């Protein structure tokens, strides 16, 4: 009997960031990440079922946009 094909994975794709990983990465409380997702702000978020995720590239782009010119 043949096994079903495994789902295709995009070469070079990174795992999505969890809210906790994002909070740890930028040094904010987890509640702040959830506020960003519900009120706007923060990086672009993705809903995967009932789970909140973010692409690392979107996080980096958002951080770059937060730079304050001296």
Image (tube, grey):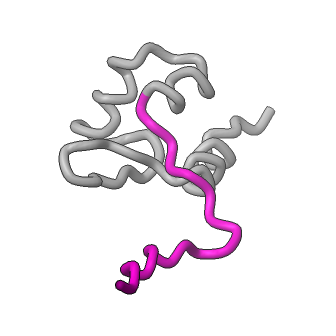
Q: Position of residue 44 (x, y in %)?
A: 42, 53
**Magenta-span inclusion, residue 17:** yes
Which quadrant is the N terminus positioned in?
Answer: bottom left
In percent of the image, x 57 and y 46: which residue is there? 59
Q: Compared with residue 1, is residue 26 higher up or lower down, i.e. above or below? A: above
Give the farthest residue toward the right.
70
Image vertical order of residue 4 relative to residue 18, above or below: below
- The percent position of residue 36, horizontal first and vertical second, equals 34, 34
Question: Is 39 or 47 nearer to us in this picture?
Answer: 47
Which image quarter: residue 69? top right
x then y, percent, for residue 8: 50, 78
Q: Which is the main secondary structure of the residues drawn in magenta?
A: loop
- Numbered marks: total: 0
Q: Is residue 67 magenta?
A: no
Image quarter in which the C terminus is found? top right
Query: Quarter-wise, where is residue 33 in the image?
Result: top left
User: What residue occupies the far top of the structure in this picture?
Assistant: 29
Residue at the image point whose x is 47% and y is 46% from the top: 43
Q: Residue furthest front?
A: 1
Magenta span covers which residues?
1-19
Question: In the rendering, at what x and y percent does residue 28 appear?
Answer: 51, 17
User: In front here: 51 or 42?
Assistant: 51
Q: Compared to 46, does 12 lie above or below?
A: below
**Residue furthest bottom in the image:** 2
Residue at x 27% of width, y 52% of height: 47
Residue, x 44% and y 37% (percent of image)? 18
């Amino acid at each position: 009997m043949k096994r079903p094909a495994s789902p295709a994975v995009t070469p070079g794709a990174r795992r999505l960031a969890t809210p906790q990983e994002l909070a740890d990465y930028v040094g904010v409380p987890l509640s702040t990440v959830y506020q960003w997702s519900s009120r706007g702000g923060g990086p672009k978020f993705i809903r995967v079922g009932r789970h909140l995720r973010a692409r690392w590239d979107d996080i980096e782009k958002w951080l770059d946009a937060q730079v304050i010119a001296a």
